[in-house]
Image (spheres, grey):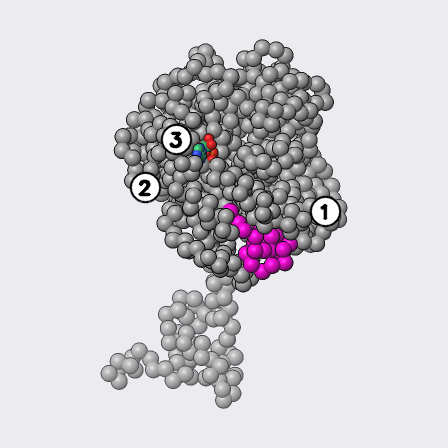
Amino acid sequence: MKTPGEIQYITLRNKQMTMYSPEQLEFLNLASNGHNIILTGQGGTGKTYAIRAIVARLMDIKNVAVTATTGIAATQYTNGQTIHSWCGLGDGSISGKELSNLIPKEEKYLKARMRIEKCDVLVIDECSMLSQKMFDTIESICRNVKKNNAFFGGLQLILAGDFYHLPPVPDQLNGETGKFCFQSKAFYSSVPHHVDLKTVFRQEDNNLIQSINALEKGELSDDTAQFINTVTKDIDHNEETVFLFATNYKAKLHNHDQVMKMEGDLKTYKSRNEGDAYYLNRFQAPPILGLKISCKVMLVTNLSDHLVNGLTGRVKELTEDHVKVHFEMVDQIVTIERKLFVKFDPVSRRALAKRVQFPLILAFGLTIHKSQGMSLKSIIIDCEDAKIPGQIGVALGRATSSEQLQVKNFKPSLVSKHPQAIKNFYDCSFKPSCDDLSCCKAEFISRDLEVDLFAPFDIDNIELTEDEDPDDITGPENFVNEDEPSSEELPEFGPSPFPEYINMNTIVLDVHINSYLKTTKNFESCKDLLLHYNASELQEGQFFCTSILFKLQYLEIEHKSSLVKFDSVIKERTKPSKKSDVGRGNIRHIGGYCVAKLKYKYQKKVQSALYDTNKVSQLENARKKVLFLSHVTVSYSDLTVSSTSTDTLKTTHRKQNIRQSLTNISDVTFEFFEKLNEAIRNSETFSNLHKHGEFLIENIKSNIANDTELRNIWITLFENLENDADPVIEQAILDDLFNEICQKFISVSASNFRKDFITHVKVVKSKAHRKKVLESKEKKSTKKVLMSEIKSDKSDGKLASHLRLKAGVLDNNKYFIDKVYTKKDIQLLRSAYEIPTLQNIRKIK
Ligand SMILES: Nc1ncnc2c1ncn2[C@@H]1O[C@H](COP(=O)(O)OP(=O)(O)OP(=O)(O)O)[C@@H](O)[C@H]1O
């Protein structure tokens, strides 16, 4: 196996060489001379080791704060804490911009203020997860507290991490775009020096080291693929073995199965919840926690500087009010009580969701995100769904040797490249160091740098974004009708089902959604809508939830469209004669969207049924459905190689976010959706609408449900799926999924059909109206001037005022056709306006 040129793989421990690698020494020299510096290097190159060394060296002469972006990374240092708590960033209820003004002044931030004031050196480890916004926030807080106009208020900044590791998490609510810290305008002025460590210490096996390096960078050589092959066989797992997964969903399932297998009584703890389900789903603390004595658990919040998020331990005692856990790393038995978790909206400063639960999760299996920074003696890595660039490399980098390492479900297509920005960072030339430290003392000048500082997100919530709701990504647009883009999925066509099943009084919520909802205009329109549905009056100060408001508005549109009578003038909906790639791409995208949406729904069902003894069969059923739906999805990179209609992938690719393949389906599944679309399209006609009226969509749904040919095509998609389901149960599951997927697809299609129809009706109506207006205008203009009036008009300006009439007379025919003037009248007018007759013209010629 070749060794890449830029890395010197020296196994120092074996050869008993010097204590530090040359790059570690370079770093130590620069840092001890007071320079601001960023230390990078692949996992195991000794970044943490070097940081510990510099902290030990500087501590006697300076005040050093050691922080990290995650709790578990912070535990690697004596007195380490998260950067989040070090600078008082709190619970996210206040935006970063405000905090940078509040922390220097307000009493409640006294501790954070004192920490910053006395700090000379700030160390931030795992800086790949430090976002640009977070970096700017901390910079401005330090500058404001220290009342020093140098970047970071003049303190020495030491960053450590590897940008080929996991990136910052985007968080829409906090305006967090997920950009890296080096993308901040203040970065290169604040951190002018860079040292990249090349010597790997954690592992001694060169093949493993090279594979980690390549996979972290998103590269896959033959050697790496060969190495992965050698670690696919089963290892003997023991108590120490940790299972790593790419998604929360898989980690949770594994943990559930493991604890259920353990001996002893299961104790379940239900959480108390309040607020928006979307945010409740995003809490780390689970809705139901199932524990047994001796099971492995992990803390999901910081309880103190030592008891931090990510710390693992074993359960020692379970009572109604507390759980006792032995945390091996700090060798402490801790009594843990329930804790309140809150998700704030930093703009309105209101709590969006609250959960009371023990701050623990099971830890037989972890997500790769949670494992970042760990050294593990025995690991089994499940690569399924590991689509984030570098993710498999990070997982592999946890292994200390290849003996106790097993890699499952690895596919070359999972190895993907990092964004170009990272390469640019590593290619960038940093400043040379100056003895007088002038290189590190840049002054903060431009106010432009202080852009939009939002509240930071809790980086320990990082995994949440992996199990995304397909609605978080771009939803279905421009479906079926290739000419008319549409953006929203409307409720089912037909009469409003709304008043029957929802008590209107319950939907008038005292919720601030956005400022528009508070306007008088909106208030009045809501009132009208309520009156339309005979619901109670809206009280002053109450506001509609956006979704309800929009639903009512859609229903209103439907109501209006249902009043439009079908008319022979309305032509049939146009059908594209030959399907374009864009049109087919749309069908593929919507098909994939429906699959992803359903998969997400059942993943949530699985998670809510875990540890609930009353929901055992529901859990099994939902698990199977997720498995079946996963079978028809394929990653984008796989499809680009294997698909026979690659042009149809473009639409999905364009509409997805960076986490590709969430909504990509196999070619055979796409064929099924094309057939389904064809069947729907044949029935979704304006004449059928005339025939079935509001029951059209219901009619289509029942026709499709009875379409055995289509159902059989769906079932054949799963022929080669290995699963342990009983054939009868399997048939029932596939039937259920067929019905649900078709219903979803029809709903999306119907919304476009409705829009087509409404647009068409509008066009027809406006054309008819326009015609009428034109006709009446013409009649008015021609009949306005009577012959008798012209004759009696003796004024001088007669010709000027009759210009239009003169023009009309010149265009002779029109006046005969409309019979406004007789032949005699025209002759008279011609002579009055001195227009020669045709005969005269010929004579003159
Ligand atoms: N100069 C050194 N001499 C001996 N051992 C070292 C040296 N540097 C690092 N190590 C050892 O190598 C292992 C990995 O080091 P460390 O955890 O600091 O790497 P890292 O770059 O921080 O890894 P990660 O990115 O995965 O967090 C540790 O066991 C550490 O003690």
| Mark before the other along the chain sequence, 3 or 1 | 3
Which amino acid, by three-letter code, is at mark 1? Lys
Q: Residue at point 48% right, 16% down?
A: 238
Across and down, in percent, residue 725 comes to 45, 14
Which amino acid, by three-letter code, is at mark 2? Glu
Residue 558 visible in the snapshot: no
In space, the residues marked 2 and 1 are separated at their CA atoms by: 50 Å
Across and down, in percent, residue 402 comes to 38, 23
Q: Secondary structure at mark 1?
A: helix
Residue 438 visible in the snapshot: yes
Q: Secondary structure at mark 2?
A: loop
Residue reaching furthest to the right: 539
Which amino acid, by three-letter code, is at mark 3? Gln
Q: Residue at point 32% right, 26% down?
A: 227
Instruction: Judge depth for marks 3 and 1 and give the one in front.
Output: 3
| Mark before the other along the chain sequence, 2 or 1 | 2
Q: Quadrant of residue 332?
A: top right
Membership of 147 in magenta stretch: yes
Q: Residue at point 62% right, 22% down?
A: 326
Q: Is 355 placed above or below 32 here?
A: above
Q: Is 590 placed above or below 319 here?
A: below
Q: Nearer the viewer, residue 189 or 257?
A: 189
Labelled disc at residue 108? 1
What residue sits right under mark 3 in the picture? Answer: 16
Membership of 191 in magenta stretch: no
Q: Is 369 placed above or below 264 here?
A: below
Q: Residue at point 54% right, 13% down?
A: 261
Q: Nearer the viewer, residue 150 or 380?
A: 150
In space, the residues marked 3 and 1 are separated at their CA atoms by: 51 Å
Across and down, in percent, residue 392 comes to 41, 31
Establish whether ligand 1 lies closer than 8 Å to the Cβ of label 1.
Answer: no
| Mark before the other along the chain sequence, 3 or 2 | 2
